[in-house]
Amino acid sequence: MASASSQSARRGSCQSSRDVASQPSKVGRRKWTIFEVGKLVEAMREMVDAGVYKADNGFKPGYLHFLEEKMRASCPSSGFKAKPHIESRVKTLKKDWTTVHDILTGVRHGCSGFGYDNGTNTIVASDDVWVNYIKNFPEAEKWRGKRFYYYDECCYIIGNDRATGEEARSAADYLNPTNEFVVDLSDSESGGPNTVNVADSSGTRPVRSETPEATSKGRKRLFTDSRTTIGEYMLQAAEVMAVEIRKSTIEIAKAILDDKDRREAVVAALEEVYGIPPIERAIYATKLAKGNELMVGFLSLDPTYRLAWLQRMFPDVM
């Protein structure tokens, strides 16, 4: 009888152990503190400055190990590992920054009227602006009054990973927004079966190439020739754009040569940057007005990135 009871107890113990094992483990899952997130952002900025792990659209393999080493040094008691802790947090940081950035810059739905308060680390806007925006994007409601720390730092770290609107356009698009190359390999009455037409969308610049016979080899060669022609157009477009950029830069520099005009341009631009106290704004204006290169560099930036740029260029001010 005792033996039966003992066996029953063992079976119950085993069943209990299996039940516990089947439950999802929460070990290692906890919220990050503001201090820890700040240290992570600091490590990411150091990583970007070093340029070792920065890629065109994100970070190169090995960056998580780099961040883990930095977090181990700055937050030794956190126990954060590259995976899943740091990887997950970086993804969340990118996702949150993207949402906040889209709200502030009006990327989505052409919104306007939003600003970022560096004092409270929140998005600021009138009630009407918020209501209209949330109607179109309900998921944005969480950021109404919610703090998002390190926005400017994230603009510097993550901003270049996103190419939208003008940033995503090719060199030819800058010169002629409607320009498109059309490669027609179909049989047509005007071109015949052995003709490849490469033209822009207006049809005003056709490039024709003919071969003796319509074979697959001939078509392949024709398409290669058309790609070469397209490449030449793109190269020419890039060269023209480079010349135009240089001209624009020179014109901007000439326009602000006068000290008075230069200072007025700086002050006007600085007033659009949220979160800079009046005294520090005056200091920035004085520093920027010392040279045309600094002025042109500052004015050419997207207003969203100007504060991060100022902090980077003049760390002694703040």
Image (spheres, helix red, strand yellow):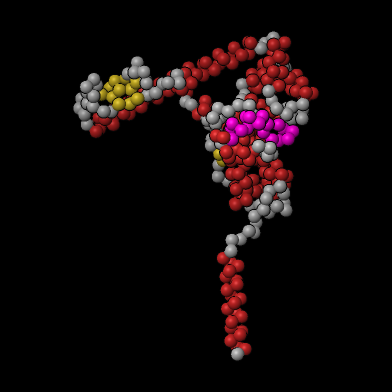
Give residue 188's position: percent from left, percent from top: 23, 24
Nearest the viewer among 134 and 229 is 134
Magenta stretch in the rendered image: 115-134
Residue drawn at point x = 70 percent, y = 27 percent: 274
Q: Up-down: is 80 above or below 312?
A: below
Quarter of the picture containing the C terminus is: top right
Question: Residue 48 falls in which quadrant of the image?
Answer: top right
Give residue 178's position: percent from left, percent from top: 42, 21
Answer with left or right where residue 244 lies relative to residue 260.
Answer: left
Answer with left or right where residue 230 lies relative to residue 142.
Answer: left
Give residue 310's position: percent from left, percent from top: 70, 27
Nearest the viewer among 1 and 293 is 1
Residue drawn at point x = 25 percent, y = 29 percent: 218
Answer with left or right where residue 136 lies relative to residue 146.
Answer: left
Q: Most extreme residue toward the bottom, as rendered? A: 1
Q: Up-down: is 92 above or below 310?
A: below
Q: Up-down: is 97 above or below 36?
A: above
Q: Up-down: is 233 above or below 217?
A: above
**Is residue 150 shown to the viewer in this render?**
no
Question: Residue 299 falls in which quadrant of the image?
Answer: top right
Is residue 80 shown in magenta?
A: no
Q: Most extreme residue toward the left, as rendered? A: 213
**Is residue 217 shown to the viewer in this render?**
yes
Nearest the viewer among 235 and 7 is 7
Is residue 118 shown in magenta?
A: yes
Residue drawn at point x = 67 percent, y = 50 percent: 31
Question: Residue 300 falls in which quadrant of the image?
Answer: top right
Nearest the viewer among 229 and 75 is 75
Give residue 193's position: percent from left, percent from top: 22, 26
Quarter of the picture containing the N terminus is: bottom right
Q: How many marks?
A: 0
